[in-house]
Image (cartoon, grey):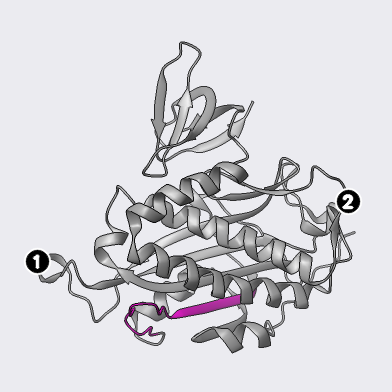
Amino acid sequence: MMIALKAATPQLPRTTAVADHVVAVDETDSTNALAVQMIGDGSLTLSDHQDGELAVAVVAADRQTAGRGRNGHKWVSQPGRCSTMSYAVRIPRAIATDESVNGWLQMIAGLVTLDALNGMIEEYGAAPNQPDCSLELKWPNDVFCHGLKLGGLLSELVIPPSSGTGTDADADDDVVIVFGVGLNLALGACRLPTPQSTSLQLHVSGLPSFGEMRDAVAERQVEGFRERLVKFIADPKGQAESLREEVKAVCWARGRQVEAHFTDGTTLTGEAIGLNEDASLILRTQDGTDHTVRTADVGVL
């Protein structure tokens, strides 16, 4: 019989030292929902972005009772085993709503997460159990290890109370992007929610305690979001080009036969070739036609 795990308020000293705000609770329905609510009611504020500077706020919980994934999927997590964090940043509305570049915001979140996990592993002298256990990104929002889902990301745009809406909105206004990041760090094999999921401790030996892992990863994510988004805000087009090359090296689906499942129930099967300039996926069907996929769940055949 599996013993129920009790939630406890996350202790995040390293994250608190680098973030502009940290809100930590033992339990909430969703860290993204809590972040959105607090931004909306003014209880969580972020200073306007400045050249070379970016405020980052963190909302953390040990247990989520209604965790959400992309396209309405549920995200199942367990206290003391899974990291559930949301990172809120202010960026220019013009960038957040520009469909030619805003797809890279999700890719940036994925790269930040890989950097944070790999950095934590290196810091503690841990090492993969197998040479093929490197961390990768499954377009558009999953962290994969050994072909299994280790984590998921969900981004949401929020209009802060100080910004205008509708005809009052100014393209120079800031909006807030909330990046939710759920990671299975210390789940045992018997606690995995699905056969397609995995946990970092199943692939890497020499890891620290869950609490240390969670804090070390979150600290790096705060610093990573700040560094990467400052560069992206300064030069979205230029950064998109370099990000495309960077994602290519860690894109799990690239070169594989995949099936894209769309929200209207239709599917498209083909080889994942790479990413377009706007971060959409290129899927080549058997007849040699390249298709652009912007919103879909993608699985390997």
Q: Secondary structure at mark 2?
A: loop
Choose mark 1 or mark 2, whichever is in front: 2
52 part of magenta stretch: yes
| Mark 1 residue crowding within 10 angstroms, few (<14) / some (14–19) / many (20+) | few
Name which residue type carries label 1.
Answer: Thr
| Mark 2 residue crowding within 10 angstroms, few (<14) / some (14–19) / many (20+) | few
Tell whether 90 sits left or right of 164. Answer: right
Q: Which residue is labeled 2 in the image?
A: 129
Q: Earlier in the sequence, mark 1 or mark 2?
A: 2
Residue drawn at (70%, 75%) of the image: 216
Q: Quadrant of residue 234?
A: bottom left
Predominant secondary structure in magenta? loop
Q: Is residue 287 above or below residue 5?
A: above
Specify the farthest residue to the left: 167
Q: Is residue 202 above or below residue 278?
A: below
35 part of magenta stretch: no
Q: Are marks 1 and 2 in contact (CB under 8 Å)?
A: no
Tell whether 297 sits left or right of 186. Answer: left
Q: Quadrant of the C terminus?
A: top right
Residue 130 in picture, x, y percent from top left: 87, 46
- The magenta segment is 45-62
Q: Is residue 203 above or below residue 18?
A: above
For the question of whether residue 175 can be seen, the reply is: yes
Name which residue type carries label 2.
Answer: Asn
Q: Secondary structure at mark 1?
A: helix
Residue 167 is tagged as: 1
Q: Disc 1 to disc 2, how far (Cα)?
A: 56 Å
